[in-house]
């Protein structure tokens, strides 16, 4: 695969953006760190370990859906050649199921995996190989700016993939805005396949985000290690603990790092010391959960029709296939 960094400024500004986001996040009244910074090399490897844990049903359920339904999804698309643009592709181990489904139905696939993490695309490179039916062009960049960039390259009907419940990282207002940005950057009749984790018993979700091997805890703590490495932070990782829990009012899993003691932490590239009280949380991630009604509402609000919700046998997860609807006004 050619991993092209087409959006050069994204990479060039990465450290600056990271530093700005950490400054804003750690100097706010309720401290936070954006979850998009989880995925450095170690974070990407830890995420792979999380996904192989028994408790972490999300990846397994979506894998089950794509294994069972890829051919049906391929048959729902009329076109013989598809530009498959994947947002936050990660290691691509589920995407390959859909790609094979499309190819087996005789379609040509031009695959554009987008990820903010170069390490994720390097892992994807091990899992998916080009062929006469499959062209691959990876892009290191942010979801929307990379999609905007691809608009000038992609000339066929698009299928935009947003798997793994990444959409859950946005809150209810942000996800509406995000889908509208996608809609604006896609053409009439293009397709969108999004993975939504469905609302279920809090007990099941709480164990998924608190695996017994402690990989989720290591994954969260790794954010501090990353700040130490890339921004000259002086976090002592052992002085923070992971806490993850479902908030039924919000309908979201929330994860935090909690400061075990009162402490101050200096970050060199910001020339600033941050103060933490004992038991003070740093908010890291939302993982919003959805009902079928939420999904129908989002599709309608976005300007899409739902072609089909593909679910696993336990109704834990759905990959929802939508089609973009735009009005055309005939010129007289
Ligand atoms: C939870 S993983 C899921 C990976 C894959 N979609 C799956 O279902 O297994 C999230 C991926 O999205 C990427 N990501 C997170 N925020 C991003 C952003 N704002 N722009 C582009 N990629 C992003 C991460 O680097 C990571 O590889």
Image (spheres, rainbow, N blue to C red):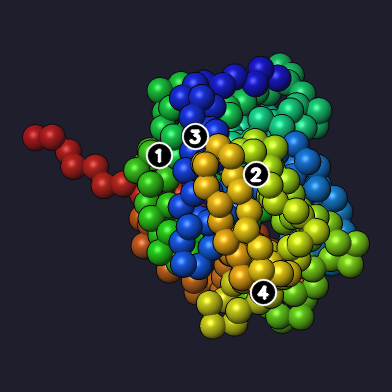
- Does 28 appear above or below 199? above
Q: Which mark is residue 279?
A: 4
Please state if 189 lies on the left or on the right of 103 as rendered: left
Mark 4 or 3: in front is 4
Mark 3 or 2: in front is 2
In front of the other: 70 or 276? 276
Mark 4 or 1: in front is 4
Q: Position of residue 246 (x, y in %)?
A: 66, 76
- Are dots 2 and 1 in contact, CB under 8 Å? no
Q: Residue at x 48, y 29 (%)?
A: 13
Which of the two discs, 2 and 4, labels the residue nearer the N terminus?
Answer: 2
The residue at the far left in this view is 332
Q: Which mark is residue 186?
A: 1
Please state if 172 lies on the left or on the right of 318 as rendered: left
Which of the two discs, 4 and 3, labels the residue nearer the N terminus?
Answer: 3
Q: How crowded is the residue under tag 2: few (<14 C-alpha within 10 Å), some, or many (20+)?
A: many
Mark 3–mark 2 distance (CA, rounded to whole Å): 15 Å
Which image quadrant: the N terminus?
top right
Which of the two discs, 4 and 1, labels the residue nearer the N terminus?
Answer: 1
Q: Which mark is residue 233?
A: 2
Mark 4–mark 3 distance (CA, rounded to whole Å): 29 Å
Mark 3 or 1: in front is 3
Answer yes or no: is residue 99 visible.
no
Which image quadrant: the C terminus?
top left
Please state if 96 lies on the left or on the right of 36 as rendered: right
């Amino acid at each position: 695969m050619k991993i092209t960094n087409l959006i050069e400024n994204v990479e060039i500004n990465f450290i600056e953006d990271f530093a700005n986001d950490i400054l804003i996040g750690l100097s706010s009244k309720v401290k936070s760190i954006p979850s998009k910074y989880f995925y450095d090399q170690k974070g990407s490897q830890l995420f792979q370990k999380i996904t192989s844990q028994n408790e972490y049903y999300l990846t397994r359920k979506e894998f089950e859906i794509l294994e069972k339904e890829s051919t049906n999804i391929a048959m729902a698309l009329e076109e013989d050649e598809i530009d498959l643009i994947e947002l936050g592709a990660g290691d691509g181990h589920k995407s390959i199921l859909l790609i094979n489904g499309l190819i087996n139905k005789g379609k040509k696939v031009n695959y554009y995996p987008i990820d903010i993490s170069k390490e994720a695309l390097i892992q994807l490179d091990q899992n998916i190989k080009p062929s006469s039916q499959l062209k691959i062009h990876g892009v290191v960049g942010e979801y929307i700016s990379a999609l905007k960039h691809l608009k000038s390259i992609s000339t066929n009907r698009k299928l935009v993939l947003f798997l793994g419940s990444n959409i859950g990282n946005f809150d209810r207002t942000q996800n509406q805005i995000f889908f509208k940005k996608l809609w604006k950057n896609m053409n009439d009749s293009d397709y969108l396949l999004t993975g939504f984790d469905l609302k279920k018993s809090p007990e099941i979700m709480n164990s998924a985000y608190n695996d017994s091997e402690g990989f989720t805890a290591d994954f969260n703590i790794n954010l501090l290690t990353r700040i130490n490495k890339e921004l000259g932070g002086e976090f002592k990782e052992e002085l923070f603990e992971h806490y993850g829990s479902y908030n039924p009012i919000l309908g979201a899993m929330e994860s935090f790092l909690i400061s075990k003691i009162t402490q101050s932490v200096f970050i060199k590239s910001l020339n600033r010391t941050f103060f933490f009280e004992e038991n003070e949380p740093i908010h890291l991630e939302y993982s919003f959960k959805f009902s079928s009604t939420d999904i129908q509402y989002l599709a309608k609000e976005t300007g899409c029709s739902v072609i089909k919700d593909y679910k696993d046998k336990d109704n834990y997860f759905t990959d929802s296939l939508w089609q973009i609807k735009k009005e055309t006004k005939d010129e007289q």
